[in-house]
Image (tube, grey):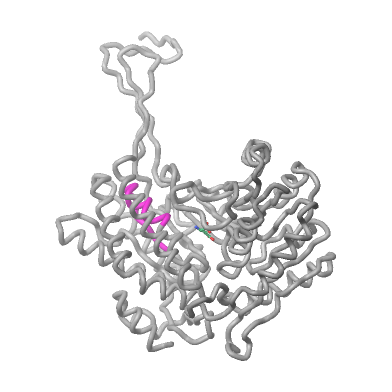
Amino acid sequence: MTTHITELLSALGVSSSAFTGGTLNVRSPIDGAALGAVHEASAEDMRAAVARAHAAFLDWRNVPAPKRGELVRLFGEELRAHKADLARLVSLEAGKVSSEGEGEVQEMIDICDFAVGLSRQLHGLTIASERPGHRMMEQYLPLGVVGIISAFNFPVAVWAWNSALALVCGDSCIWKPSEKTPLTAIATQALFERALARYNAAGGTAPAHLSQLLNGGAAVGEAMVDHPQVALVSATGSTRMGRAVGPRVAARFGRCLLELGGNNAIIVTPSADLELAVRGILFGAYGTAGQRCTTTRRVIIHESIHDELVARLDRARAQLKIGSPVEAGTLIGPLIDGASFEAMQTALAAAREQGGEVSGGERALASQYPNAWYATPALVRMPAQTDIVKHETFAPILYTLKYKTLDEAIALQNEVPQGLSSAIFTNDIREAETFVSASGSDCGIANVNIGTSGAEIGGAFGGEKETGGGRESGSDAWKAYMRRTTNTVNYSRSLPLAQGVKFDI
Ligand code: UN1
């Protein structure tokens, strides 16, 4: 695999010195083979990078937004041209099956397109002033340096959601990717640098260090989080990470965009199309080997269809093809590492202790891949929503629960500390509308007749409670990457004060 990775990275514009001779060892979750040894930055390097990023920001903010969009358009072109190679690298480094690796790069392309259009639509409002001869308006102006912390499971798309928007908004970016997936980050950075060179060769004025990548561990991330010149920290990962990052950024009055854990449920009601429900649940629960923040972790089923649906899910679960993610036909690839498999086993043991009946969840393909961690998808029939069910385990475990009334189902859905994604399968319009209403799902994403994962980039992405409250990607998520100013302009010859206040000299 090592030779193959060299060719792949070279096709993506990365020279071997960028991924050899360093201290951060990268292993493929497919078979445990070494992929490279990446150089790690220090906290001091991060501080220097922030200073460079700030200087870049001071220039970039004055480039007209549609011209900033042109850079993102060129980056989208690079991604289109290198989609297959980058997707393959995502599969090798993160263990995603081929179509998901390609889907991830497609998400990057889509957000670039979205951001290019947005670069002509960063508009504020004109507001009626209470004073004669006055006009009020608001503007969205570039914010500053945006620090992006990304997770292994979407090693490149989540960075693109942030950086494509930040760049058209006039910000500079610094990326601290997961230590488990530095190679996809290095390759993405190389494609970005190529777009930047083309942009400047065509007369553009993009500053150096507009978007930087620093690989490394917690100390590097902390130096970014604590730096007063990082105006926005956008962090995707565990709730534990968010708990560390959020208060530190708040302590310096920085801005934070947190996209943390989910514990996403699907409610299946008596009128549901079970064909659709089964497919939606299987993809949601076991796709990406259960390693999406939007993975379906709970299914809450009406008692009248519970036994039938659980039996169908269990049968289908056992047939899902587990294997190398780059082999045709594989639906379930490996877990990212051994620690992840251990966490899965610990959760299953707790579920058994709490009355759960477990099917699956064993180690798979151990003789073929002794240094990798594959698991059969697990289905756990739970008697109640116990502690372990309320906990996010980043693995293919689906807990099944039974309900009698829709109110009870919605209460169960909302009872967990996380609030990212949720769905209902129903053909009853009252149930569907109740689910998406104020007294329905409390999540940032609430779907009808589709599963919890696989969100499109056009909507705002994120969730409530322990999910962190941030919104990334589509809709008006761009506003987080800009600062709003309110401007009152007096074009009269007098100076009336607001609220009728008198201050005559
Ligand atoms: C994540 O797992 O961090 O909705 C992001 C989805 C993807 C994004 C997931 N578009 O599943």
Q: Does the image show residue 240?
A: no
List x then y, in percent, for residue 48. 36, 64
Foreground residue among 148 and 104 = 104
- Quadrant including the C terminus: top left
Q: Residue at x 64, y 36 (%)?
A: 438
Residue farthest bottom in this picture: 367
How many labels, in total?
0
Foreground residue among 104 and 428 = 428
List x then y, in percent, for residue 501. 44, 11
Splitting the image into 4 quarters, where does residue 387 fall?
A: bottom right
Foreground residue among 67 and 423 = 423
Is residue 438 positioned above or below 164 on the image? above
Q: Residue at x 28, y 66 (%)?
A: 193
List x then y, in percent, for residue 39. 41, 78
List x then y, in percent, for residue 334. 57, 77
Foreground residue among 313 and 157 = 313
Splitting the image into 4 quarters, where does residue 310 fall?
A: bottom right
Residue 165 is a magenta residue: yes
Is residue 49 positioned above or below 172 on the image? below
Is residue 489 positioned above or below 25 on the image? above
Q: Residue at x 30, y 78 (%)?
A: 11
Q: Does the image show residue 379?
A: yes
Is residue 279 positioned above or below 449 on the image? below
Q: Residue at x 75, y 72 (%)?
A: 359
Segment tinted magenta in the rendering: 161-175
Side of 4 where 357 appears, left or right: right
Residue 106 is a magenta residue: no
- Quadrant including the N terminus: bottom left
Side of 128 where 385 appears, left or right: right
